[in-house]
Amino acid sequence: MTLVPQTLDEINYWDLDMFEHGDPHEAWRIQREQAPVWWHDRDGGEPFWSVARFDDALAVLSDPLLFSSQRDGIIVRTDAALESGPPGAGLGIQPMIHTDPPRHAPLRSIISHNFRPRSIAQLEDQIRAAAVECLERAADERDVDFVIDIAHQVPAAITFALMGVPEDMWSRLADLQHQTVTATDPEFTHGRSPQEAAAAASLELHTYFAQIIQERMEEPGDDLLSQFLQGRIDGEELSWMQVVAEAGLLLAGGLDTTRAAASAGGILPLIQNPDQLKLLQDDPSLIGGATDEFVRWASPITSEARTATRDCELAGQKISEGDRVVVWSPSSNRDEAHFEDPYRFDVLRNPRHLGFAFGEHYCLGVHLARLTLKVEFEELLSRFSGFELTGEPARVRSNFVNGLKHLPVRLTPK
Ligand code: HEM
C-alpha cells in the first residue's frame, strides 16, 4: 500500500487506498513527467496502457474506431470483474456509452434533442425549485452533509424527473446506482463483495426499469424512457432490454457526476480558497463561468477505458490490437503542458478540459450539468455567507468515480 507514490515503480492504480486516502495526483504527476503512456501491469486487474497527458488522452478519445468503447467496455476491469464477464452481462445488451460507430450515433440521437442548450434552459425553474427546497431545509439544519443533503439532491431530482421516475423510488434507485457504479466502496455494498453487490443491485434495477418500461409501452409519456421506446434505428424499434440499459446509463451519468462537481470541485475548494469564494460572492454573474473549473478540479469520472482495434502508436509507444488503454481525466486536467499553474483552483480560468470527455461520447448531459451547478451555487451563495468544514471530507473508494461521499459543512445564513 503506497498512499503517495514517490517513483513510477510504486504506482499501482489498483490500489484503492491511494484513491480513498492517498494522493493519486502525485502518481499521475510522476507518470506525466516520466512515462506519459505507460504499460501498467500490476496484480489486481487487467494490464493496460495508462495515458496521463492531455494531448494523448485527446488522441484516444478522438478516435472511437481505433479505441473502442464497445469491445470491452469503458470501465477498467479488476481480476474479479474479468471473471464475472462483460459489462451489461445480465442483459447481454450495452447502453450507448459502451457502443462504437456506426451503432452509437443513432442511439444517442433518439434523446439528444432534450439535452441541447435551448431545451435545457427550459429546465431552469425546475432546477431552481429543487435547489431552493433542499437549501431551505439546510438553512434550518445549518450543519449539513453537503454531499448528501445538497450536492446529491438537485441533480437527482432533475434526472429522475426527466426519466419519469416517481419520487418514492428516488432514494432506493440512488442506493442501487451506488452499488453498481461504486461497488468497490464497502460503504455502499454493506459488507458484500463488489461483484455480489453489483449483480444484486443490477438485477433489482433491471427489474424495476423493466416494469416502468412496460407501463410506458402501454401509456407513453414525454419522458426519456418513452422517447427511447418510440425511437427507431433503421426502422427498427429498440428492444425493451436496450431501453433498460439506457435507463441505467442515465442514472449513472446524471447523479454522482454533478454531485462530485458540486462538492469535490465546488464547495470544498471554495472553502479552502476563500479568495475564490469571495470573487463569486462579490459578483454572482461569475458563477456560470466557474462551473467548468468545478468540473476540471473534481474530474468526476476518473478513468475512461478503451480497447485498441488494431496495432498503432501513441506517444512513441507501440500499442497492439486488443490492448486496453486507460485515459485518466484528473491527470489530463492537471497537465502542466496544457494548463497554466494547473494545481491552482481559479474560478476565472474558464478551462478547456476533458472532464466531460471528448468526441463521440462527449457527455450528453454537459449543458444540464453546467446549468445545475450554476443555479445551485447562485441559490447557495445568495442564502449563506459562511461555509465552514466541521469534519474530514470522505472520498469515494474507486478508481472510476472521483468524488466525495461525505462533506460535513456548517452553513451561516445571511
Ligand atoms: C459534472 C457532471 C458530469 C460529468 C463530469 C460527466 C462526465 C461524462 C463523461 C466523462 C462521459 C464520457 C465517458 C466516456 O467517454 O467513456 C459522459 C458521457 C455521458 N454522460 Fe455525462 N457527465 C456529467 C453529467 C451528466 C448528466 C447530468 C447526464 C444526464 C442526465 C449525463 C449523461 C451522460 C450520457 C448519457 C453519456 C454517454 C454519452 C454517449 O455515450 O454518447 N452526464 N459523461
Image (cartoon, helix red, strand yellow):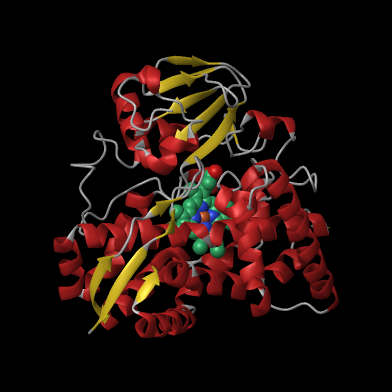
The one nearer the camera, 189 or 323, is 189
The one nearer the camera, 26 or 94, is 26
Q: Residue at x 77, y 46 (%)?
A: 93
Q: Quadrant of residue 336?
A: top left
The one nearer the camera, 157 or 124, is 157
Q: How many marks?
A: 0
The one nearer the camera, 55 or 53, is 53
* Residue 363 visible, this orientation: no
Residue 22: x and y in percent read 36, 38
Residue 327, compared with residue 223, is above or below; it is above
Q: Is residue 163 left or right of residue 8?
A: right
* Residue 212 visible, this orientation: yes
Residue 25, compared with residue 123, is above or below; it is above
Q: Quadrant of the N terminus?
A: top left
Q: Residue at x 13, y 62 (%)?
A: 275
Residue 2: x and y in percent read 39, 28
Q: Is residue 174 left or right of residue 135?
A: right
Q: Quadrant of residue 160?
A: bottom right
Q: Quadrant of the C terminus?
A: bottom left
Q: Residue at x 82, y 60 (%)?
A: 240
Residue 325: x and y in percent read 53, 28
Residue 26: x and y in percent read 31, 32
Residue 364, compared with residue 121, is above or below; it is above
